[in-house]
Amino acid sequence: MEGISILLVDDNEDDRFLTMRILGKLTLDVRVDIARNGDEALAILAARGEADLPAAVMLDLQMPKIGGIKLLGRIRELFSQEQLPAIVLSSSENPADVAACRELGITAYLPKPLDLATLREALAPLLTSP
């Protein structure tokens, strides 16, 4: 399988470590940029530009500065779901959070702790996109 680029946005170092471990177990080359909050994520996306967007952004909902739902809103102001798929990683099972994320055009809402099979399934459509 070909490699993909992912922007991982999570303020929790332990969660980032676990997500990186699971990404490392995938049978594909994954390049990961890390942002510790929404401001960093937006700065990374701006620096990369539209021509060099990651294959997906994976983000937590509970973050300082700009929370995940607000970050999703800003990302959708800049990029369509087709341009930048978003995968939410969250321990929240709050139906309002899930609904808000779906309204903002997410690709998947994955529960924490993340598992390999669920992540592989969420990333599969990105690997078959042109």
Image: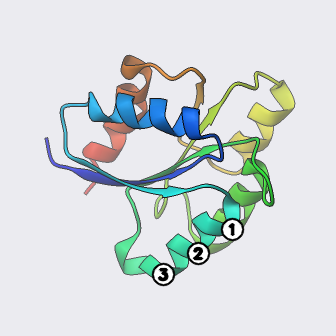
Which residue is label 3 attached to?
A: 47
Q: Measured along the vertical axis of the image, is residue 45 above or below residue 10?
A: below
Quadrant containing the C terminus is: bottom left
Disc assigned to residue 88: none
Residue 108 in sight here: no
Circle 2 residue: 43
Asked if labels 3 and 2 touch by Cβ distance under 8 angstroms, the answer is yes
Indicate left or right for 5 with 45 as reference.
left
Q: Residue at x 41, y 68 (%)?
A: 53
| Residue topped by disc 1 | 39
> In the picture provided, is 49 more to the left or to the right than 29?
right
Q: Quadrant of residue 73?
A: bottom right
**Farthest left residue?**
1
Separation (CA) of disc 1 from disc 3: 12 Å
Q: Are marks 1 and 2 in contact (CB under 8 Å)?
A: yes
At a point 63% along the width and 49% down the height, the residue shown is 105
Q: Amino acid at mark 1?
A: Asp
* Three-letter code for the amino acid on which mark 3 is drawn: Ala
> What whole-number distance in Å separates the C-alpha atoms at marks 2 and 3?
6 Å
- Residue 90 in percent (x, y) is at 66, 31
**Local secondary structure at mark 3:** helix
Which amino acid type corresponds to the residue marked 2 in the rendered image?
A: Ala
- The spot of residue 127 in percent (x, y) is 27, 44
